[in-house]
């Protein structure tokens, strides 16, 4: 199993987009991968949320990392989150 490394860009959005490194790792390890732009890969996973985000109550949080699979590691380029 390859290690997962978060890029500085992805870590810079951690608080602003409301995801955790554990959620990103879980999503990559347990979800199906699909092609993304620029030869990258992406996947997504829904997590039970049941909390407020920007003063609105949401039941579900979707985490969608965009990453590159290198020979010895997976590098997460960015992470998108969606609340619903």
Image: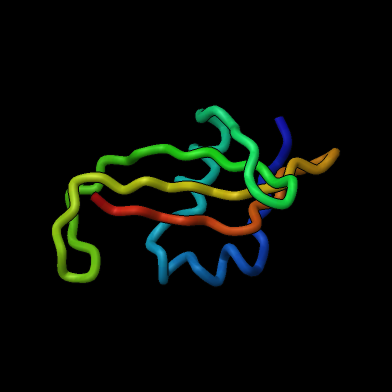
Determine the residue positioned at 23% across, 49% down: 84
Quarter location, residue 36: top right
Considering depth in this image, is 52 or 41 the residue closer to the camera?
A: 41
Quarter location, residue 2: top right
**What residue occupies the far front of the structure in this picture?**
37
**How is the protein colored in the picture?**
rainbow
Q: Is residue 11 left or right of residue 71?
A: left
Determine the residue positioned at 41% across, 64% down: 17
**What residue occupies the far right of the structure in this picture?**
71
Number of on-image labels: 0
Question: On screen, 72 above or below 53?
Answer: above
Determine the residue positioned at 55% across, 71% down: 12
Question: On screen, 42 above or below 81?
Answer: above
Q: Position of residue 4 (x, y in %)?
A: 66, 45
Considering depth in this image, is 4 or 44 the residue closer to the camera?
A: 44
Q: Position of residue 1 (x, y in %)?
A: 71, 30
Determine the residue positioned at 51% across, 53% down: 21
Considering depth in this image, is 83 or 3 the residue closer to the camera?
A: 83
Q: Position of residue 3 (x, y in %)?
A: 70, 41
Q: Position of residue 29 (x, y in %)?
A: 57, 32
């Amino acid at each position: 199993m390859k290690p997962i490394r978060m890029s500085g860009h992805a870590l810079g959005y951690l608080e602003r987009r409301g995801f955790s490194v554990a959620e990103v790792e879980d999503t990559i390890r347990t979800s199906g991968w699909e092609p993304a732009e620029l030869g990258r890969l992406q996947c997504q996973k829904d997590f039970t949320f049941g909390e407020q985000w920007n003063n609105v109550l949401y039941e579900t949080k979707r985490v969608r990392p965009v990453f590159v699979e290198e020979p010895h590691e997976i590098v997460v380029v960015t992470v998108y989150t969606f609340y619903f």
